[in-house]
Amino acid sequence: MRRLSWFNATSLTLGFAFLYMPMVILVIYSFNESKLVTVWAGFSTKWYGELFRNEAFLDAAWVTLRVAIFSSTLATILGTAAAYVLVRGGKFFGKTLFSGMIYAPLVMPDVILGLSLLLLFISVGLDRGMLTIILAHTTFSMCYVAVVVSSRLVSFDRSLEEAAYDLGCTPWDAFRSVTLPIIAPAVISGWLLGFTLSLDDLVIASFAAGPASTTLPIKIFSAVRLGVSPEINALSSILIGLVTIGVISFSITTKRAAIRRMREENAT
Amino acid sequence: MKRAALILLPYSWLVVLFLVPFIIVVKISLSDPALSIPPYSPTLDLSAGWAGLTSFFGALDFDNFRFLTTDNLYWMAYLSSLKIAVISTFVALLVAYPIAYGMARAPEEWRPTLLMLVILPFWSSFLIRVYSWKAILANEGLLNQLLLWIGVISEPLTILNTPTAVYIGIVYTYLPFMVLPLYSALEKLDTSLLEAAEDLGCTRFQAFWLVTFPLSRNGIIAGCFLVFIPVMGEFVIPALLGGSQTLMIGKVLWEEFFSNRDWPVASAVAVILLAILVIPIVLFQRNEEKQREAEG
Amino acid sequence: MAHSNPQDVFAPWTDPDAKPLIRFANVTKRFGDFTAIDDLTIDIYEREFFALLGPSGCGKTTIMRMLAGFETPTEGTIELDGRDIARVPPNLRPVNMMFQSYALFPHLSVWDNIAFGLKRSDMAKDEIPARVEEMLRLTRLDRFAKRKPHQISGGQRQRVALARALAKAPKLLLLDEPLGALDKKLREETQFELMDIQEKTGTTFVIVTHDQEEAMTVASRVAVMDHGKIKQVDTPAHIYETPASTYVADFIGDVNLFRGTATARGDGTYSIDYGEGSAPIEVSECDLSLETGASVTFAIRPEKIRVSSEPPEDRDNVVEGTIIDIGYLGNLSTYHVELPGGQMVKASMTNATRLSRRDFTWEDKIWLSFRSSAGVVLTE
């Protein structure tokens, strides 16, 4: 089976066409001259210009970016600690509850998470704004980080940490100089995952956001709910472009790192 | 001491921002709507001491849940969500299987790239991917233009704002969740098993049906749960593509909360939705555990 | 090798005034209901090469982990140089360990792996490079200092692990199955290298292994373990020639066991009846004082039994048998011989001449013979 059979080649072609066609069309039509998105009226970049003059979108983008950076950083710290405690912490009171709370947000519908957080913020009298969005995003992102990091910790040879203690490390020193460098790729992927989840989230942010702080997804949603707008096409194209560049460059660097790591692990 | 701090930090974060909010949802679902701020009663008044506590619990009741059973809207919404989730999970499986199979049979040096192509949409915005179908499915949209041009139809089809559009949107956005577990199951499959089956007299198709398909069962189960569970609570796809015709419980919850401001009913809707989802979630976890044990 | 040199016998365990480096006193370790170590008492002396030998699950790794500080005993004390170390954490013990998986840090070079422990000791910063170079020379790794662990071979990795553990000049070095990952040939070479390094550095080594040949080759004393208990502690030669129990006799090397009853003949000689109709085994030079009628086991190694076509006249014990199977191992051949009573006996002969003259073959009737002092009588 060195070469693809015609059946497999067809299913791959159709499958990937299905996955990518809508986004390709979106990007093409973002350069459409006409206000009507479905009629091609010539090439133009005017919608990009419009977009960059739209203060509301720029403000929302800035809020979204700050929320994503803060929440994913906080989530990485909390999630890595949670993963370490889960995998290496031994037994402690309420461990089952703890691991349940890590896994539950991954499968719980966004509407429920958002609703429950909003009710909490209201009952403690916390004004909704950027802070509440950051708190909400950190909560679900940390669970994703914890899962990514703990799967790396599970496959990690425990005797490496013991060797560090044996050679004179305190637990913190062993974590810093041995564990952390080895799990670093997982921690970075966890951060990236948290970052994109936060950038992308509409439902939870809608519950947690106040009138003064709108994120980009909320803005996009209210703009497209009623119809298609060329400005949103331009904005979407920019986001798709950024993600594509980011993911491709990240996967090239991690692929190199993974090849190196695999060799290292086969060696030890 | 340091260990205690390390445990306490993420632990207390999750208790305060996940467990407590959830308890509040349950509590409010048992309260009565009121025209006040916050728009429900009773509110817990700890300053009244024990009497406050007993009167608080005394005022809680299942009225909201009873209300949900009397109003057809909610029944229909739960059932319609269930139906949409089941059908779209099945369609996603049919679409994803050939893709995953083709990936697993592709030359080894292509596979990482193909895998990345499946994961890439997952990293780009969910909202934008759903939105991209709006222009395609509209009455004057590209799909209708194409079909009219070919001559398959003479009148534009109405797809947008119908359940069909919701199915397309769901299958499209959740496809990677189905492809990935299928691919990882099929990729592990030893091709010499198929050769052995053919050697023992199977045709290609029999070999697939008797060997490949049963051995990819774990991938199928995992993929189906990964699509079914989030689709049950989906809000964005029906809101953007489904119009007013499509009833889904996530959308009902949203509207109950933001439009009607009936927090107790919204909370009750959430509690029941979660109760429905607990069964597949537990089944899914058990399947994952079994698989982990099997793999040692 | 000091301990094999007859002029300068290294045997501190025979000296009642010698102070042990390590003293386990009534140590018990339980994991839940499971007792891993059961009331264990041993002394290990300075400069010893001490082997803990036993099947997997016998508790030998638990002893090692208690010495390293990864486990604390449930009961009893562990003393190092007279100081109780049972509760001292691993990073504060003058003990280092070479891990079975080597546990080399994959993100650090060979040089940094060896320097890792030194950087966390009170050694002055400018002395570290000299010490690392010294260790690299000792383990012949000079050329690989800049490489990462995945860029060197298995044997080299094993030496990095050894150099890293020795760098801090520990009072005690623990080696957990140090040669388990190497192939047979490399393992044999490395055994001698280990002994050489132990000699040069004068460090006390405690090695855990399930490989009896390895334990016999490297160790000054071997402790044979089973189910959390020590069955016997002695020099390799004593363990082999005078095992204390059938378990030890059976675990170390090949052995033939005859169960029977002893009849005292006086002056350390006994005859042992082991089967209906067979002539009793005559035993001399037995240290045990046994009552007549005591049930005992007679153990004899295959190489101490001679196989011949005619009954020899100069042996105390002679018995006829039939060859059932022959195992040709190159340097020697092992014969599986069935005695008239149905018992199977293994006898091995070195193949001194190159071409076997095929003296014996399957189904041949032959004679087995051995001296009265060739075996041992065991009561356990």
Image (cartoon, coloured by chain):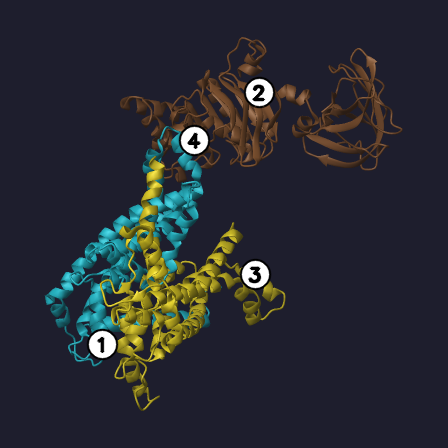
Chain colours: A cyan, B yellow, C brown
Do the dots labelled 4 and 3 sit on one chain?
A: no
Residue type, label 2: Arg
- Cα–Cα span, label 1 and label 4: 67 Å
Instruction: Find numbered disc 1 in the image and state the secondary structure of the residue it sits on.
Output: loop
Residue A230 in the image, given as x and y percentages of width and height: 18, 74
Residue topped by disc 3: B193
Considering every residue shown, the one lying at the far right of the view is C277
Q: Are marks 1 and 4 in contact (CB under 8 Å)?
A: no
Q: How crowded is mark 3: few (under 14 residues within 10 Å), some or many (20 or more)?
A: few
Which circle marks residue C221 in the picture? 2
Residue located beneath label 4 in the image: C161
Do we see residue A178 in this rendering? no
Between residue C91 and residue C138, name the one nearer to us: C91
Task: Name the chain letter of the residue that bears numbered label 2.
Answer: C
Crowding at dot 1, Cα within 10 Å, few <14 / some 14-19 / many 20+, comes out as: few
Q: Quadrant of the C terminus of chain A?
A: top left
Badge 3: chain ID: B
Q: Mark 1 points at which residue?
A: A226
Return the residue nearer the eye: B225 or C157.
B225
The secondary element bearing badge 3 is classed as: helix
- Which structural element holds mark 2? strand
Tag count: 4
Distance from the alpha carbon under mark 2 to that under mark 3? 52 Å
Residue C37 drawn above or below residue B217? above
Asked if badges 1 and 4 are on one and the same chain, I answer no
Q: Which residue is drawn at 34% across and 28% down?
A: C115
Across and down, in percent, residue A79 comes to 33, 48
Structural crowding at the residue carrying mark 2, measured as other residues with C-alpha within 10 Å and reported as few (<14), some (14–19) or many (≥20): many
Q: What separation in Å lies between label 1 and label 2 (alpha carbons)?
A: 86 Å
